[in-house]
Each structure stands twice: as C-alpha cells, then as structure tokens.
Image (tube, rainbow, N blue to C red):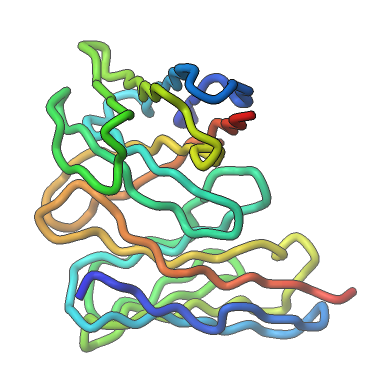
Amino acid sequence: AAGVIQSPRHLIKEKRETATLKCYPIPRHDTVYWYQQGPGQDPQFLISFYEKMQSDKGSIPDRFSAQQFSDYHSELNMSSLELGDSALYFCASSLDVGPSGNTIYFGEGSWLTVV
Amino acid sequence: GQQLNQSPQSMFIQEGEDVSMNCTSSSIFNTWLWYKQDPGEGPVLLIALYKAGELTSNGRLTAQFGITRKDSFLNISASIPSDVGIYFCARRIQGAQKLVFGQGTRLTINP
C-alpha cells in the first residue's frame, strides 16, 4: 500500500539559508501534519492542514511556513535557518472520519542538518 | 491536561522476555495510538484504540484502552531483537487535527 512520501530524505543547509520539504500524503487522505523531532526528543507538532486549509498550529517558528496544495501535497518552507533547526522533520497524513477512527500515518522523515 | 506520561523511559531486557509499558493522562480522550520508531525513521503505527476498555492485539503486541479513558498499556510478548526501538504512545487532541506524543520508551534487548 502507498505510504506517506517525503522528500528530500536528507538536506544540508548553511545558517540563514532557506529549505523546503515536501510531503505527499497517502492517496485520499485529507489531513496533513508536520512534526519536528530533535535528537532524543519525541515528535513536536508544528502545523496541520485539513482539506487544504490550515487546521491547527503548534510550536512552529515564524520563520517557517507551510501550505497544502490542490493535489493535497504539502510543503514546509523554512527560512533564515538556525543551527537549532537541525532535526528530523516528519509529515503524516490521515483521513478524517470523525471524533474517533482517525489513524495517522507517518512518512520516513526528512533529515535537515544546518551547518 | 494535554501531557502524556509514558513509563518506563527505558527498558533493558533479555530476548524472550515479555515487555509492558504504559501511558497516562490527566484528561480523558477518545483515541490512543501506539507507534514504534527505529533510529532515523518515521514512527510506524502499531495499534490504534478507539473505545474505553478496548483490547487489541497485533501479533505479539497487545494494547488496551483504559476504562477510565485516561490510560493505556502496551504489552510485547516473547521479545525478539527486532523489537528494539522507541515506543511512543500518542493521543489525538479532541477537536483538533494534531497528535500529542508521550516521551517514549526506549527498548533494548540483550540477546
């Protein structure tokens, strides 16, 4: 079965540069989530989109922005990169079937290293 | 209220032993999800629970949604080397499109 696809898998950027991560959700899923996971940390919620509209916002820095496109893929844009942005970034997707029944699946993640 | 307390933080066991870990929350909710994460990989969904008291198995894994709706446990029977990893509980925030994770349980198995 198709899973959540993220690209690139690895990315190295210098401080103050910009990075863009892409996410292709599972077909027919209507919700996309972005998470950031630092070394030894649990995943921290950044932002989510439902039907191409921003749904919830977590601890996403103002330097970051995201959107979901008409084909449901999503992009996370990170500007003015800082060393502390080095982390594993996950995208996840789900199909909203009401208060219960949502099952959220994660991609393999994109490793961002800021040097 | 949205925090999940997961324990233990780490476990060191012998191959073949059974494992038990749990998560608690101060608030009630409708969904418990258990994930396993290997180093550098995305969390993989193991078991999803949607009803209080629900007991669900997936091979050697068994998870239960506590009757009070504030806790859940995950058991692994007859552990094998590939069970090594970090196990996270997670809950969906009611009315929101986001998951909150527990701190994780790091499982190490001695052959």
Residue drawn at the location 14% of the way across and 51% of the way down: B96
Residue drawn at the location 49% of the way across and 17% of the way down: A17
**Quadrant (top left/top right/bottom left/bottom right) for the N terminus of chain B:** bottom left
- Closest to the observer: A43 or B61? A43
Relative placement, left or right, of B77 versus A83 is right
Asked where in the image residue B48 lies, by quadrant, the reply is: bottom left
Relative placement, left or right, of A98 versus A78 is left
**Quadrant (top left/top right/bottom left/bottom right) for the C terminus of chain B:** bottom right
Counting every numbered tag in the picture gives 0
Residue sitting farthest toward the front: A16
Residue sitting farthest toward the right: B111
Residue B87 vertical placement versus A72 (above, below): below
Q: What x and y, as percent, mark residue A70?
A: 20, 11
Residue sitting farthest toward the top: A70
Q: What x and y, as percent, mark residue B50?
A: 25, 66
Asked where in the image residue B93 lies, by quadrant, the reply is: bottom left
Relative placement, left or right, of A96 versus A74 is left
Residue drawn at the location 36% of the way across and 21% of the way down: A77
Residue sitting farthest toward the bottom: B68
Residue B110 vertical placement versus A24 (above, below): below
Q: What x and y, as percent, mark residue B71?
A: 32, 82
- Closest to the observer: B101 or B30? B101
Residue drawn at the location 28% of the way across and 25% of the way down: A66
Q: What x and y, as percent, mark residue B80?
A: 77, 69
